[in-house]
Image: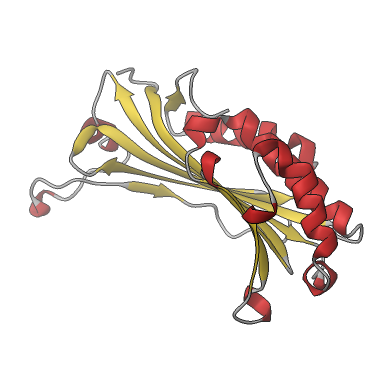
Amino acid sequence: MSVEHALLKPIRSELHYRGVYGDNAFELLGAPVPLYRSLVTHLGPFGVTLQNLKFESSGLADSHVSCGLPELNVGIRVRVDRVEIDFWRLHEIGADSADRIVLATWTAVREASDSVGIASHFVDLIMIAEILGGNCSALMNRYVMPPEQLGVVDTGVAFYSRPVEKDQQWVDVVLDRVFGQDSQLFVKVTMGFSAAEVAIDALALHVGTITNTTLDRVGLQLGTDGPK
């Protein structure tokens, strides 16, 4: 394992996206038929039919139209104040397909209500990766050395952004050992940024750049087959 960088080979990954509106869009759920139509139209190429759509509500704040893509392990929820998309097996469908699903979802939402605007993006990228040529114990010793009084213990590390002003970009990183696997690393990269700074069609590239740059700064490098 290089002193400068540890090379990681991603094994599994998932991504959770939240796109927050500039203002609440009550019309989306107050009269959801246009949204149903748009979701079927634009997500149809990914297997969405009427059977995949559902309106759920236990109260106004939790009301949403859900759209499941079970064969792709993707869940979509259109709420009054935001869009949520969960990619539970990103490593299987790939970043390109995930990007197309995000774009198609936003196209459907905007088609259903042209007053909806995106204010900010939030992304959680979670990976399980193999540490090539090294182990988690040695890697964690780069960042933190536990007190001798604790004896032999495992450690994890988190890097959190300082408090930021509204609409400023931020990124947090959590690194930890996968239970029972000293050669595998749990990586979670969480980020947020303004939609005014990053257009929706540039979202995937921006997320990939932030992820790679941030990991590089803490001495990690993803293999070429990792999430982009």
Classify the position of the C terminus by image quarter. top right
Q: Is residue 172 left or right of residue 163?
A: left
Q: Residue 71: x, y in percent?
A: 53, 40
Q: Is residue 162 left or right of residue 30?
A: left
Farthest-out residue, right:
114
Classify the position of the N terminus by image quarter. top left
* Residue drawn 85% across the image and 71% down it: 27
Q: In this view, does 106 lie to the left or right of 65?
A: right
Q: Residue 35: x, y in percent?
A: 80, 59
Q: Residue 176: x, y in percent?
A: 31, 44
* Residue drawn 49% across the image and 31% down it: 92
Nearer to me, 128 or 182: 128
* Residue drawn 41% across the image and 28% down it: 10
Nearer to me, 136 or 203: 203
Seen in the picture, residue 86 relative to 135 is either above or below; the reply is below
How many numbered circles are shown?
Answer: 0
Farthest-out residue, bottom:
59
Residue 217 visible: no
